[in-house]
Image (spheres, grey):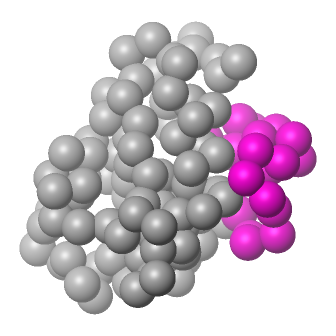
Amino acid sequence: MRVLFVCGRARARSPTAEQVFSHLPGVETASAGVSDDADEPVDADHLAWAEIIVVMERAHRRKLMRRFGPALRHARIVCLDVRDDYAFMDPALVRLLEARAGRFLPPGSKAG
């Protein structure tokens, strides 16, 4: 399963999710951001690669749809509703991601 985590600038939430879930068996992860100043801007190659796109906020889904609508037909997009209130690898962010993203990952897999 290929999972792309998307947030605004790809500096805290999505890179944390990428790292937290990268060790799951059968799961490949990547992260990107929808903002113009993102450290890793999302592009069509990211979207073509991903089977599941996990956005942190509804606004991220809207930006993706506006920019890449047709390229998103194949992918499942889910929103975790995680606000931009955390630093990279903040333990509270890790717990929140594990709690909210777990249902979208393969059964029986746990991060950590």
Tell me where residue 60 appears, x and y as whole percent.
48, 76
**For residue 88: magenta?**
yes
Taking the spot 53% from the left edge, 41% from the top edge, the residue there is 18
- What is the quadrant of residue 81 in the picture? bottom right
Tell me where residue 75 appears, x and y as whole percent.
24, 53
Question: Relative to residue 23, is residue 32 drawn left or right?
Answer: left
Tell me where residue 15 appears, x and y as whole percent.
56, 50
**For residue 100: magenta?**
yes
Question: Relative to residue 73, is residue 14 drawn left or right?
Answer: right
Taking the spot 19% from the left edge, 45% from the top edge, the residue there is 49
- What is the quadrant of residue 110 in the picture? top right
Residue 22 or 106: which is nearer the viewer? 22
Is residue 41 among the parts visible in the rendering? yes
Quarter that holds the C terminus: top right
Is residue 103 among the parts visible in the rendering? no
Tell me where residue 5 appears, x and y as whole percent.
47, 52
Magenta stretch bounds: 82-101
Quarter that holds the N terminus: top left
Question: Relative to residue 80, is residue 90 drawn left or right?
Answer: right
Question: Relative to residue 40, is residue 70 drawn left or right?
Answer: left
Taking the spot 63% from the left edge, 32% from the top edge, the residue there is 20
Q: Is residue 44 above or below residue 108?
A: below
Taking the spot 41% from the left edge, 86% from the top edge, the residue there is 36
